[in-house]
Image (cartoon, rainbow, N blue to C red):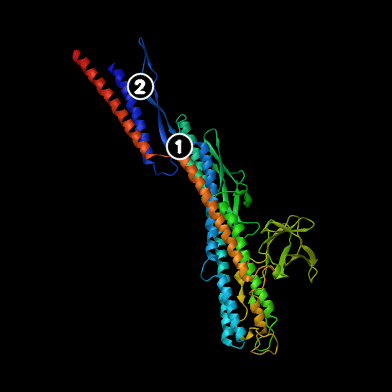
Amino acid sequence: MSNSLINTAMSGLNAAQVALSTVSNNISNYNVAGYNRQTAILAQNGGLGTMNGFIGNGATVTTVNREYNQFIMTQLRGAQSEAAAQSSYFEKVSQIDNLLASKTNTLASGMEDFFKNLQNVVSNAGDDAARQTVLGKANGLVNQFNNADKYLRDMDAGVNQQLSDSATQINTYSQQIARLNNEITQVRASSGGGEPNALLDQRDQLVTELNKVVGVQVTQQDGDAYTVTFANGLTLVQGNSSYQVAAIPSSKDPSRLTLGYDRGNGTNEIPESQIGSGSVSGVLKFRSESLDGARNQLGQLALALADSFNQQHREGFDINGDAGGDFFSFSGGRAVNNTNNTGNASLSVDFTDTGKIKASDYRVEFDGANWQVTRLADNAKVPATAGTDADGKPTLSFDGLQVGVTGSANKNDSFTVKPVSDVAGTLKVAISDSAKFAAAGAEDGGKGDNDNVKKLLDLQTAKVVEGKATLSGAYAGLVSSVGNQTATAKVNSTSQNNIVTQLQTQQQSISGVNLDEEYGELLRFQQYYMANAQVIQTASSLFDAILNIR
């Protein structure tokens, strides 16, 4: 009898030890990212058959459960991936908003200061100090355009660096998940199907981190290995194998990096539209929508200012009676060949009417018979007028541009035409001698003639940007556009983060460690352990009594 009591109590002690160890493990891992609460599952041992019926034979621990809900985790990962995209986009666009919305040293104040000092020349056209001040203010304004453009170019370079870093992260996570797939399969096999909970937690946490970089989908093979895919089905992990991504030059513009995928047969460019979530998605969206738009609007403004001022400046005469030349200098547009082109065609870009120039890049594609032009800012098809230049070479005219074609294009060859993206960064003041400032309206006007500078001053209120906006109005439009994008991004990011918080709360209610609950479990299993120890003490007393009888 005492032996039976001892055996039963020992089973209870063993069960209590496992339960206490499980509770202790939960408490220890309270702050560990990715840890899922564990629960010891106790069951009764089979009874012993006697003449008086079956007598209980104690307790056993059947398994240690990992409290994990795959459905909720899938929902949470989807929300986290989208939140990462929204957050990375908001972070980037906010930097442009901060640049443009600065209250000091803005382009708006620079342009206002420049035109304000033109008024001094109107009042005293022969005053060399006033002329020198205009050149100084012009150089200051040019520096503001240059600095703003450099800031945006640095952001472009930053996107390249972030994509390169993200590719490294993706590969590291994929390799680690594949390794854990292999370990989990081996441990399950060697333990007769036991669950390696710690390895499962590590793998799920790696998937969560990978998913924040680039949205992934997870399927499970035979209850063991994960298969991880992204970008509409490209496999990153399959069993114990992982596949590589790389940051490679974009075929549309080799100066920019994009993601490429290699499954062992060479690296192929991934269409950016296929990457729909994760921080990589937010960065790519920022570059194509906000960064390009801001650079083009800035370039359009610089072009409208410089070319309208040059045209009027050429109508006047300087102190020496010489006709005015260009006051500003700047680069023209350019075309970027798609690296997948099979023909030998190249494009040149010239301005025909800067008042019609749009703040946009264009895709120019040859369909085998004709050229198709798409304005990328609004994805609109643009009618292009075919013609020839002075040398008889074919040209396309649209939106104030003339695009010349040299060489032969094959079907599906394409080019990206960038009319204004380089203007702000290359803008310079073309004259350094104040005497060459063409303030006069007539060749013999002399120092006192201010007729042309009056017309230059009128440009401040003229609608020189696409024929519908003044210079200050166009800049205000740029600030407003970026501000609206930033405000929308903030709302979207906040909303998505709230969804993540709700799902995390739901997930933690199942998988998270609640210290108050664990303290309660600790006391419960402590009492359970002590009660079983008391049974052993009772059985020992009975055993001693029997020995004393003898």
Disc nearer the start of the sequence (2/1): 2
Q: Read off the residue under disc 2.
A: 58
Amino acid at dot 2: Gly
Q: Position of residue 341 (x, y in %)?
A: 71, 57
- Which residue ends up furthest to the top in the rendered image? 51
Q: Read off the residue under disc 1.
A: 510
How many numbered discs sit on the rendered protein?
Answer: 2
Amino acid at dot 1: Ile
Q: The C terminus appears in which quarter of the rendering?
A: top left
Give yes or no for contact between labels 2 and 1 (Cβ–Cβ under 8 Å).
no
Q: Position of residue 214 (x, y in %)?
A: 55, 48
Q: The N terminus appears in which quarter of the rendering?
A: top left
Rendered view: 240 above or below 546: below
Among the 4 quarters of the image, the one containing residue 406: bottom right
Residues 329 and 252: in front is 329
Among the 4 quarters of the image, the one containing residue 419: bottom right
Residues 236 and 155: in front is 155
Mark number, residue 144: none
* Residue drawn 69% across the image and 77% down it: 311
Q: Residues within 10 Å of mark 1 (few under 14, many from 20)?
A: some
Inspect this view and state whether residue 176 appears. Answer: no
